[in-house]
């Protein structure tokens, strides 16, 4: 069978528990959309708790692509299985399969979000492994700060965050955002920083921009937030 082509970094999720592995993978798919190849491998060859090197190897082969594969696991022995399975690949493929020490669920979700936005393998790995702590960026002026209330069911997380940062990247202006009740501004073009705000439905987002298309950027992004980040009702549900 011919594998579908993709321009996104693939993600393999390994857990001692089949339910944990499949549940995490499903969360990544729902948060990041269907463009990111995600496969889960959980349990031993009998379906109990443990790991299965052959199953992990098959997963690598299933989703392998030129953009690379990021592997995220739950416990220490799973890392050994992941490494052994990688050694079964052809040498040229081994170089593009990277095993990450990121926390399983949070790391996988962040990895999926960055992959969906077109990140490289290094960028996806970096996002998965770093804590999403907000890095403060101070605007040069408090003028021209505009606000918008978030109405999307899941807030500015994962899939909406990917769409928001992709739209922000389309402008030359430097764009900063923060929650109205917080003091720290973050780069609106960084998926990790945007998700670090943990903005929920009902919260108010402040936006500020500087650059040749600053006004257009703010107007467009506010409209985008007000219109559910471009998602239809069935996508939100």
Image (cartoon, rainbow, N blue to C red):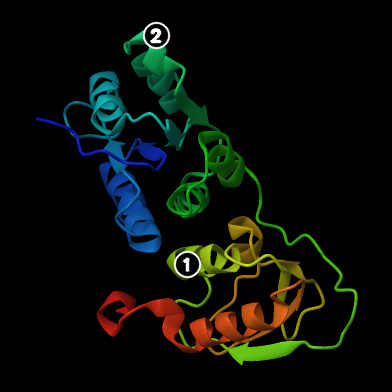
Picture quarter containing residue 230? bottom left
The image shows residue 94, relative to residue 99, as above or below, that is above
Write down the residue under mark 1.
163
Picture quarter containing residue 189? bottom right
Q: Of 109 and 228, which appears nearest the observer? A: 228
Point out the image quarter for the C terminus: bottom left
The image shows residue 82, relative to residue 220, as above or below, that is above
Q: Assign a secondary structure to mark 1.
A: helix
Mark linked to residue 91: 2
* Marks 1 & 2, CB-CB < 8 Å contact: no
Q: Nearer the viewer, mark 1 or mark 2?
A: 1
Determine the residue positioned at 44% across, 23% down: 96
Distance Cα–Cα, label 1 vs label 2: 36 Å
Q: Of 3 and 17, which appears nearest the observer? A: 3
Mark count? 2
Mark linked to residue 136: none
């Amino acid at each position: 069978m011919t594998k579908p082509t993709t321009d996104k970094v693939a993600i393999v999720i390994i857990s001692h528990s089949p339910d944990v592995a499949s549940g995490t993978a499903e969360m990544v798919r729902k948060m990041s959309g269907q463009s990111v190849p995600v496969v889960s491998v959980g349990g031993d060859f009998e379906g109990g708790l443990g790991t299965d090197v052959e199953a992990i190897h098959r997963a690598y082969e299933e989703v392998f692509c030129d953009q690379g594969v990021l592997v995220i696991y739950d416990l220490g022995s799973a890392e050994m299985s992941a490494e052994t399975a990688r050694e079964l690949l052809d040498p040229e493929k081994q170089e593009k399969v990277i095993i990450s020490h990121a926390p399983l669920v949070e790391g996988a979700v962040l990895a999926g979000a960055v992959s969906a936005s077109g990140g490289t393998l290094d960028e996806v790995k970096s996002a998965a492994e770093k804590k999403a702590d907000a890095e403060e960026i101070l605007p040069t002026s408090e003028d021209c700060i505009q606000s918008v209330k978030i109405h999307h069911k899941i807030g500015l997380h994962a899939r909406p965050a990917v769409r928001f940062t992709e739209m922000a990247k389309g402008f030359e202006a430097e764009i900063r955002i923060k929650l109205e009740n917080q003091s720290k501004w973050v780069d609106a073009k960084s998926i990790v920083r945007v998700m670090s705000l943990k903005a929920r439905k009902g919260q108010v987002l402040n936006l500020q921009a500087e650059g040749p298309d600053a006004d257009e950027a703010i107007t467009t992004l506010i409209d985008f937030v007000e219109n559910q980040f471009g998602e239809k009702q069935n996508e939100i549900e």
